[in-house]
Amino acid sequence: MREIAAVTFDLWDTLIQEHPGGSNRVARIRVEEISSILSSAGSSHTAEEIMAAHDRTGIFLRSVWLKSRDVPIRDQVLFMLDSIDERLPGRLRSEHLQSIENVYSESILENMPGLLPGARQVLEEIKESGYRTGLISNTGRTPGSALRMVMDRLQILEFFDTTTFSNEILIRKPADGAFKMTLKMLKVAPGEAVHVGDDPESDVAGAKRAGMRAIQVVTDDRERSFDADFTVSSLEIVPDIIRRL
């Protein structure tokens, strides 16, 4: 097999993890701030109305995600506003719509996730070893633009040569297109790359379908993949594994 030239990583539950209840807190922050913007725009709606629309948007998004596709953030916002009142998007001025999009995207910055043990040290070690590095991450309501801010605040963005987020390419893992686009940007062939992630389908199966090798990091009760080239219990073991590939 070819020598490894590039390493790609998953983000959530591989390098970073939200704190217990984090997604609910971010949703409440998002809804409260959107309510305030709508009120200032002369279109008052209760937090309950907005949260119900937020929940309906989640149902719509999950139906799209099941097809390994994604939805741009502006379209997510318009769907949510339309779920509040179908006339609402057309009544808002562009500056109000942009403010709502900013809040929708960046509420996570008010409730930051944390780094998983060893993440920064592992990334630094792999980068210093001369490997090209990429990130391949599915997104939810928080887009790549905001997740890059998160990564920068956690001091790990600097270790990546390229970052691929599903809301920007409109393809989600486990579709092999997400991996192949990243490898193209890294200028390496699939056989020269290994992907590191926690999910047996999105990370392991997706990477293997793209022709890459895969390391699954299992630190909890997550299902183990029989297709992974290696399964490890700690991210800190990964650099030694990669040097042996």
Image (tube, grey):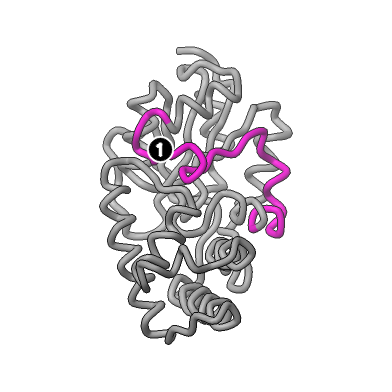
Q: Is residue 158 left or right of residue 31?
A: right
Instruction: Determine the residue positioned at 54% across, 30% down.
Output: 242
Q: Position of residue 144 (x, y in %)?
A: 56, 49
Q: Is residue 7 magenta?
A: no
Q: Is residue 108 visible?
A: no
User: Which residues are the magenta region?
Assistant: 150-177
Instruction: Determine the residue positioned at 34% across, 63% down.
Output: 58
Which residue is labeled 1 in the image? 171
Instruction: Determine the residue positioned at 54% across, 57% down.
Output: 16
Query: Foreground residue, 89 or 63?
Result: 89
Q: Position of residue 5 (x, y in %)?
A: 59, 21
Instruction: Determine the residue positioned at 33% across, 55% down.
Output: 61
Q: Position of residue 139 (x, y in %)?
A: 46, 51
Using the image, determine if residue 17 lies above or below residue 182: below
Query: Foreground residue, 84 or 135?
Result: 84
Q: Is residue 153 magenta?
A: yes
Residue ranking furthest to the top: 1
Using the image, determine if residue 32 lies above or below residue 197: below
- Quarter occupied by residue 186: top right
Q: Is residue 193 left or right of residue 227?
A: right
Q: Position of residue 204 (x, y in %)?
A: 36, 37
Q: Is residue 105 left or right of residue 82?
A: right
Badge 1 crowding class, 10 Å Cα cut-off, few under 14, some 14 to 19, many 20 or more, is many
- Tell me which amino acid carries mark 1: Ile
Considering the numbered disc 1 on the image, is that residue within a helix, a strand or a loop?
loop
Q: Quadrant of the N terminus?
A: top left
Q: Is residue 95 visible?
A: yes
Count of number-bearing discs: 1
